[in-house]
Image (cartoon, rainbow, N blue to C red):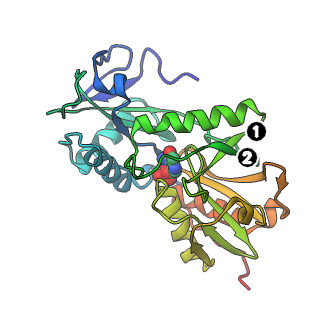
Amino acid sequence: MNYYNDKTIVYLNGEFVKANEAKMDLYSQSLHYGYSVFEGIRSYKTTQGATKIFKAKEHYDRLEQSALAVNMPYHWTTAQLIEATYETLKRNDLQNAYIRPVVFAPANMSFVKNNESFIVIEVWEMQPFLGEKLLRIMTSSFERPNPKAFKIHAKATGHYVNSLMASHEAKARGFDEALLLDMNGYVAEGPGANVFYEKEGKLFTPSPGNILPGITRSTVLEICEELNIPVEVKLFTVDELKTADAVFYCGTAAEVIGWESLDDTIFPKPWKETVSRTIQEAYKNKVVEKQFKSTLEIA
Ligand code: PMP
């Protein structure tokens, strides 16, 4: 995938510079210890034609919370970074884009806290992260990190080695993606997405604590409220998940994407007939600010 070319502009520490001329320090603590925090955001061309960053404030607020959670100095405001992001999109002539801000550390091989941090905002065009076909998922042999060993709610880069390992394992075995459990054996989340399951018209999603509580997950909960779809937030096991009518992953990059199967279990309800599909449609409409009229009949 081409993330940038000769013309691509990034926002780097207050300036707009060419991606292929931008530099970072190879002695950065971020490179050596996986010590940085980041966001994954999307912008969309709305039905009115404008460029709109979806849930921009929520994402940049989370970036700040992630930085503070892992003791990184953070000296930007959400408003300032949202403005810089719109400008970066404009300079790259992009409306439908994936936006990746990263806050990173200076050169430092010690374990002493830093006095400064740096920021880059990169933008590129990206299709749905997990594709658009129903997914074949494998229960991973990797667990999500123990929240007592890590600030699990922080979107910190080092953390993603766990996601990569789980995803590599699933793909090596011929699956599309992994599902990770928490340290107590409950269903947690995907390597880069939250999970919901549907049973008899009701949705279920894991409680926070051992997951990254995603912004898309909150949006799905909002949609459920708007459409009067019953939803319950609770811990559940893989065995329970395998009794679902339908399951989906959701995340900024993945959007809302259904599952075909988990390990050997195929989910029985045709995707077209699921409430989950209605959520997928509602989400697609919401991000482009299009009115959504549900045809769903709630029992
Ligand atoms: N869980 C993990 C581990 C993730 O990396 C992501 C993607 N940020 C999500 C869940 C979904 O979060 P969001 O909806 O905020 O993108």
Looking at this rendering, what residue extends furthest in the bottom direction? 299
Q: Nearer the viewer, residue 213 or 299?
A: 213
Tag 2: amino acid? Ile
Residue 115, disc: none
Image position, residue 1 (x, y; %): 58, 23
Q: Quadrant of residue 127?
A: top right
Q: Is residue 77 above or below residue 118?
A: below
241 vs 166, left or right, is: right
> In this view of the protein, which residue sits in the foreground, 141 or 76?
141
The amino acid at mark 1 is Phe
The residue tagged 1 is 175
Instruction: Give the distance between the C-alpha atoms of the residues marked 2 and 1, in whole angstroms.
Output: 6 Å
Left or right placement of residue 85 versus residue 40 in this view: left
Secondary structure found at label 2: strand
Q: Quadrant of the C terminus?
A: bottom right
Whether label 2 touches label 1, CB < 8 Å = yes
**Which of the numbered marks, if any, corresponds to residue 137?**
2
For image coordinates 23% across by 30% down, the residue present is 111
Q: Position of residue 92 (x, y in %)?
A: 41, 29
Q: Can residue 21 be seen at all in this image of the molecule?
A: yes
